[in-house]
Amino acid sequence: MKTPYPVDVVPLLQQFLGRRRTKLDHPLRAMEELGIDRPAFLRAMTLSEAAPDGATIDDLLFPYSTRAEMVRGMLAAGEGAGLVEERNGRFHATAKACDHARRLRVAARAHRESLEPIPLNELARLADLLERAFLASAAVSPQVPHAHTPRAFRYRAGNGSTHPMVMVDNAVYGLWMVRDDCHVAAWHGRDLRGPDLNVLTYVWRGEAETPEGLASLLGHDTRASVDASLVELRASGLVEPEDPLRLTHRGRSERDRIEADTDRFFFEPWPDGVGAEGSWIRDRLSGVNAALA
């Protein structure tokens, strides 16, 4: 599709993923049964999807995080509950974890099939448009380290249903995985590390004016890591040398280009017919999200 891109759809994808299981009580009951907290449970449930052949700590680190101890803590809790096992330095989901993941998928699918956040005919059309966008963008998704797009196909393989709400879920999840890969492709190779890019983004958004405030927002990074990123970004001329935290003209131009490239990689493959419905997609997906709140 051609510009202008329907960029206001992007935050709605993330919002949908954050709300789709809000009223699903299965995870709470499973966590109580297993005696583990939510982060450890979700890590174990997604391990087979994210890394079917097992994964190292480095594989599992969030691309912008430096706190390997957080991942180790989740995996240790999973091991204690019999959900994770380590073999030759790689962590694998156990048969018990795979069974719990199956039960979670069944419960989540039944939950979504019970929902009608907007009229079913509109929901079906929304699912069709989003699916067409996903298939087109996934076909040319950037090849990046630890690519997320393959997860989308593994996710939908275990989440089959013709119900429009399930189809919307499959498509939105898939689009978000592609968006992740497009974003990595946009900054990878620009002499930026993931943690530095994350700090740059928070300053770009104006979310903190001091290193202390910034560190409080970045729970997946240590204060020392945040300070090191600021030193690097200031030395590179991307962040002003003194507080309050502000990007230089060069820093803002660089981050703007990253965002523009992310949008181009993500939206350009969309069929023109889908792109033309951007406003309709935004309005209906907003309605779905409002009903899920």
Image (cartoon, rainbow, N blue to C red):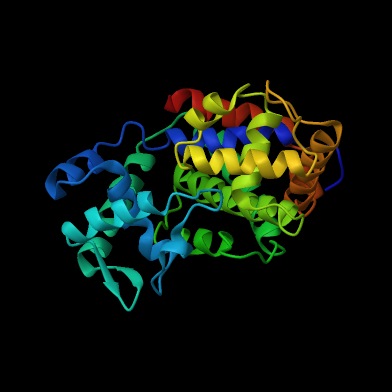
Residue 119 in view here: no
Residue 142 or 139: which is nearer the viewer?
A: 142
Residue at image location 73% in from the left, 35% down from the top:
7
Residue 149 or 186: which is nearer the viewer?
A: 186
Residue 95 or 135: which is nearer the viewer?
A: 95
The reply, left or right, for residue 193 in relation to residue 57 is: right
Please, is residue 161 above or below residue 231 in the view? below
Residue at image location 86% in from the left, 31% down from the top:
249
The reply, left or right, for residue 249 in relation to residue 188 is: right
The reply, left or right, for residue 64 in relation to residue 53 is: right
Query: Which residue occupies the extreme bottom position in the image?
Result: 88
The reply, left or right, for residue 26 in relation to residue 284 is: left
The percent position of residue 218, horizontal first and vertical second, equals 50, 35
The percent position of residue 43, horizontal first and vertical second, equals 35, 53
The percent position of residue 27, horizontal first and vertical second, equals 25, 43
Residue at image location 44% in from the left, 49% down from the top:
67
Q: Residue 90's quadrant in the figure? A: bottom left
User: Which quadrant, please, contains the C terminus?
Assistant: top left
The percent position of residue 19, horizontal first and vertical second, equals 43, 33
Residue 68 in view here: yes
Residue 282 or 58: which is nearer the viewer?
A: 58
Residue at image location 51% in from the left, 48% down from the top:
65
Count the numbered circles shown: 0
